[in-house]
Image: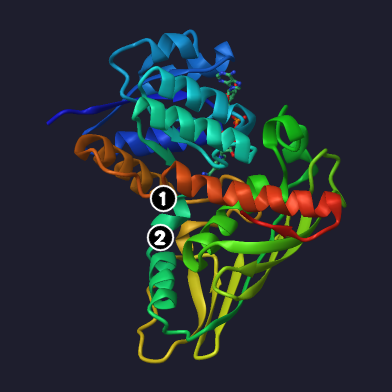
Amino acid sequence: MKKVNFGIIGCGLISNNHADAIRQIDNAVLYGCTDVNEKSLLSFSDKYGIKAYQSVEDMLNDDNIDVVSVCTPSGLHARFAVMAANHGKHVVVEKPMALTVEQCNEIIKASEENHIKVEVICQNRFLNTFRQVKKIIEDGKLGKIVSADIYMKFYRSPEYYASSNWKGTWKMDGGGALMNQGIHGIDIMLFMLGDVKSVFGHARTLSRDIEVEDTASAVVEYENGALGIIQGTTSVAPGYPRRVEINGDQGSLTMIEGDITVWDVKGVEKPVNQSESAKSFRDPMNFSIEGHILQLTDMVEVILNDREPFVNQYEGKRAVELITAIYQSSKERKLIELK
Ligand SMILES: NC(=O)c1ccc[n+]([C@@H]2O[C@H](COP(=O)([O-])OP(=O)(O)OC[C@H]3O[C@@H](n4cnc5c(N)ncnc54)[C@H](O)[C@@H]3O)[C@@H](O)[C@H]2O)c1
């Protein structure tokens, strides 16, 4: 059977999850890596015993590479995803897919023109809890959804921001509590509930010395008619797990991270809890590698069987669209209708 050769662009924190995951997947080969920082490049290529490319161009010009994982600061995702597509490589891109809707559209255009596959890392979508909740909502088990809220009261220390040359900046992070940390929760809300029609939001920098918001609150109206709250912050001590509350006129449920803590759903067995999945509400890297393994396995099967990724470029764009609409609403102090 053909093996799928991966190249990693950006050898920082999350690239270790990609490398460790790829090495556990049948038919996947961790082939090479590149980083603008020579020290990071060499220590990563040494650690995994893989080829070190001196530039992204070098990696993309190698016919052995089938797919790249873009693990750079978020502000470079669009540039490298488009470059890779134009070299005929498939793309795995970390969240957020890009920083603006326009950048997402550039990736979409390049992927369509070059007929390559794009998978946007949204590892929570692979957890059974969220998939099962999506299904019970679609099957009408909660009745008409009235209220759908997500609370992400996280903690990131001042040192977390100070120690990075890009986190907390508009140019490379594209936003803060929502675009960097809260995007996972926003993505699963869109996944489970469907699209948002309109939003009114406030985004503020209340406590951290950063350009982007450390705290945001928004009221959203879903296409299905439900009203909801999206709350995200990285400035709450000591930080709490993500809480999701979904209420319908015939049933309700609450989830704390991957655990279902309230299950008032008649006639449906409660899904098994998955609390081990994510504990990054205080520590950015305290989450299981399982989601990356499942999502990168999906990408290997996508390439070998020529099918669509579970979270493709059109899906990845949805959270960016909603988050940037919240920012626009906050800036212009008005309700934003999503297209
Ligand atoms: N899926 C998740 O749960 C999750 C978790 C953490 C981070 N992320 C995402 O992963 C991405 C990287 O985050 P991180 O925390 O690993 O960042 P990081 O700063 O630790 O690593 C980024 C790496 O990219 C390299 N880089 C910068 N510019 C480059 C260039 N021009 N060419 C090649 N390499 C370049 C840096 O030298 C660094 O080694 C971000 O988009 C972030 O949002 C996702």
Residue 64: percent from the left, percent from the top? 28, 16
Labels 1 and 2 touching (C-beta < 8 A): yes
* Left or right: 30, with 273 as reference point: left
| Image quadrant assignment for residue 26 | top left
Q: Relative to the observer, which residue lies in front, 295 or 199? A: 199
Q: Is residue 225 visible?
A: yes
Q: Residue 22: x percent and y percent?
A: 33, 35
The numbered dot on residue 59 is none
- Residue type at mark 1 is Gly
Image spot of residue 276 (x, y percent):
46, 60
Whichever of labels 1 and 2 marks the residue nearer the N terminus, that label is 2
Q: Quadrant of the N terminus?
A: top left
Q: Which residue is mark 2?
A: 127
Quarter of the picture holding the C terminus: bottom right
Q: What residue is rendered at 36% in x and 18% in y?
A: 50
Q: Which mark is residue 291?
A: 1
Calculate the distance from the C-alpha at mark 1 to the C-alpha at mark 2.
7 Å
Residue at 59 percent of width and 58 percent of height: 186
* Side of 65 relative to 334 (left or right): left
